[in-house]
Amino acid sequence: MKKRLSRRHIEEAFLKLLMLFSFLLVAGSLGGILFTVLARGLPSLSLEMLTQTPAGGFYLGGEQGGGILNAIIGSLYLAGGGTLLALVFSLPFALCMNVYASKWRWVGLVRLSLDVMWGIPSIVYGAFGFTIMLAIGMRASLIAGIFVLALLELPILTRSLDEFIQMMPCELSEASFALGATRLETARAVILRQLLPGLATAVLLAFGRGIGDAASVLFTAGYTDRIPQSLLDPVASLPLAVFFQLGTPFPEVQDRAYASALVLLVIVLVTSLGSRWISKKLGRYSVK
C-alpha cells in the first residue's frame, strides 16, 4: 500500500512539475516576444506612422518619412473580407452537419477533411490561389487575397462552430422537435441563438488568424504603397510590411518593421481579449 501510494505521489509531483515547466515555457516565450517587439518597435512608433502612407524611399532607408497606414487598412480589408466570406459558408455548413446530416455516415469523413484543411500550411493556400489567378488571367488584388484568406479560415470557422454546436445540450433540440418545430426552425430559433457566444469567439479567432498571415497573401494580394480603391487593386498588409522591412540592411527601416509588428501584435491581442469578453457576456444567456 505504501509503495502504491508513494508511486502515485511521485506521478502527481512529476505531472505538476511538467505543467509548471510548460507554463513557464509558454509565458517566457510570450514575454520574450513582447519584450523584443516593444523594445525595438516602441521608440520608432509615432502618430505619423499610423496616419500616413509610405513616402518615397521609406522602405529603402530614405528620409522622406511616411507611415504604414496602407498596411493597416489593407490588413483590415483582407482579414475582414476573408472572415465575412468564410462565415457565409461555414455557418450554414456547420448547422447542416448537426441538424440535417447528423446521422449521415459520411459526416465523420467531412469533419476529418476539415481537420486536414485546418492543418494545411498557409503557403499552400497561397500557391493554390496563385494557380487559379494564372488560369483566369487575374493579377494580384484585394479580391484574390480575400478569397484565399476565406479558404484558410473556412475550416477554422466550420470546425469551431461544429464543436460548439455539439457541446449544446441535446435536450434543447429534442424539446423543439417535440413542440412541432421543423429542423429549419430549430436551427434558426434554438441552435443559432445558443450558438452566439461560440459564433463570436470563432469569428474573432479566425479574424486574428487571417490578419496575421503573410504566406497566403504573398502572391495573391500583392503589395502597394497606396490604399486600395477597388477590389481589383493590389493591397498591402502588416505581415508583409514586417517581412519586406526586415529584409533591408538599414537599421532605421528594420526598426520600422518592429513598429509594424507591434501594431499587428496589438490588433491580435485586442482581438483575442475581445473574443473572450464577448463570449463571456453572451454566455450568460446560454443554457449550460
Image: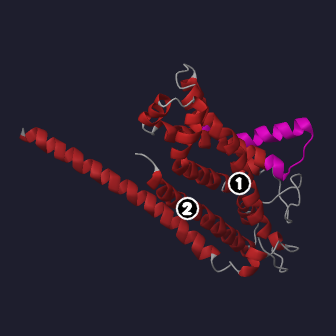
Circle 2 packing at 10 Å, graded few (<14), some (14-19), many (20+), is some
Disc 2 is placed on an element classified as: helix
Residue 1, position as x, y percentages in the image = 6, 38
Residue, x 52% and y 40% (percent of image)? 190
Residue 147 lies in what quarter of the image?
Answer: top right
What amino acid is labelled 1 in the image?
Ala
Residue 47 lies in what quarter of the image?
Answer: bottom right
Highlighted range, magenta = 118-145
Question: Looking at the image, how many numbered discs can be counted on the residues?
Answer: 2
| Residue 30 seen anywhere in this rendered image of the structure | yes
- 135 vs 52, left or right, is right
Separation of residues labelled 2 and 1 (CA atoms): 16 Å
Mark 2 = which residue?
274
Residue 282, position as x, y percentages in the image = 50, 55
Residue 106 lies in what quarter of the image?
Answer: top right
Q: Most extreme residue toward the top, as rendered?
A: 105
Mark 1 = which residue?
79
Q: Most extreme residue toward the left, as rendered?
A: 1
State whether residue 63 is above or below residue 18.
Answer: below
Could you say which disc has been placed on residue 161 in the image?
none
Q: Could you tell me which quadrant the C terminus lies in? A: top left
Type of secondary structure dominating the magenta stretch: helix
In the foreground, 224 or 197? 197
* Magenta stretch contains residue 274: no
Residue 122, position as x, y percentages in the image = 68, 44
Q: Most extreme residue toward the right, as rendered?
A: 137
